[in-house]
Image (cartoon, helix red, strand yellow):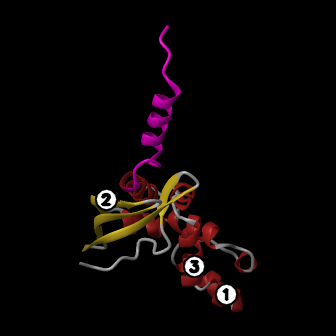
Amino acid sequence: MRTVPASCLLLLLLSCSGSGDPALSLKSFFDAAKRGKGERAVSLLSRAALDSLEAGIGLEMMRGNPGEASALLASYGVAVTPGEIDTIGASALLVRLVESPMFLRVMENSSIETGDVTLSGSRAAVQVELVFLNDTAAGDVQMVLEDGRWKIGGEGMCFALR
């Protein structure tokens, strides 16, 4: 019987999980989002990206009028009761959004292609071309090495068009 050195096993696991390659992690995020795998998609966002998302989606504003917020989210196919608005965090809300039928329809014809990766310590920039809602955008997505895995940085998927 042959044994596999631990270092080879670790490299295999890293390559399968996407944690060793920023571009692969980015593709894994997009694939999870496209397939409606909310927990998986959220796991590939950095803490800074989640903090930015929480500020950007206006959770505090939603909490000011939970009934209206719940109705608005329901119109997008995201089920959140008015009582949940007070306690739901950005991660949980994003999971529900990614798993919603509306989001899955929007993602049907979306695609991402990655290009060059620029590494700088625990940060990376991945060149991408994104097709979303019949529009094409190109730019760099900032990635950060967090907890031993490459994750989308604080800027998230919002990048400057080239």
* Residue 8 falls within the magenta-colored stretch: yes
Quarter of the image containing the C terminus?
bottom left
From the image, state whether disc 3 or disc 1 is nearer to you. Answer: 1
Q: Amino acid at mark 3?
A: Leu
Residue 36 or 19: which is nearer the viewer?
Answer: 19
Please name the residue that numbered disc 2 is placed on. 117
**Which SS class for mark 1?**
helix
Q: CA distance from mark 3 to mark 1?
A: 15 Å
Left or right position of 135 against 141: left
Q: CA distance from mark 2 to mark 1?
A: 36 Å
Q: CA distance from mark 3 to mark 2?
A: 36 Å
Residue at 30% in and 61% down: 111
Question: Looking at the image, do the residues carrying marks 3 and 1 touch, with CB atoms under 8 Å apart?
Answer: no
**Mark 1 residue crowding within 10 angstroms, few (<14) / some (14–19) / many (20+):** few
Q: From this view, report whether residue 20 is shown above or below residue 64.
A: above
Please name the residue that numbered disc 1 is placed on. 60
Please name the residue that numbered disc 3 is placed on. 73
Sequence order check: which comes first, mark 3 or mark 2? Answer: 3
Q: Position of residue 155 (x, y in %)?
A: 46, 75
Residue 52 shows up from this direction: yes
Question: Looking at the image, do the residues carrying marks 3 and 2 touch, with CB atoms under 8 Å apart?
Answer: no
Q: Position of residue 150 (x, y in %)?
A: 47, 56
Sequence order check: which comes first, mark 2 or mark 1? Answer: 1
Residue at 29% in and 65% down: 128
Q: From this view, report whether residue 160 is shown above or below residue 14.
A: below
**Mark 3 residue crowding within 10 angstroms, few (<14) / some (14–19) / many (20+):** some
Residue 30 or 133: which is nearer the viewer?
Answer: 30
Q: Which residues are magenta?
A: 1-22
Q: Amino acid at mark 2?
A: Val
Q: How many marks?
A: 3
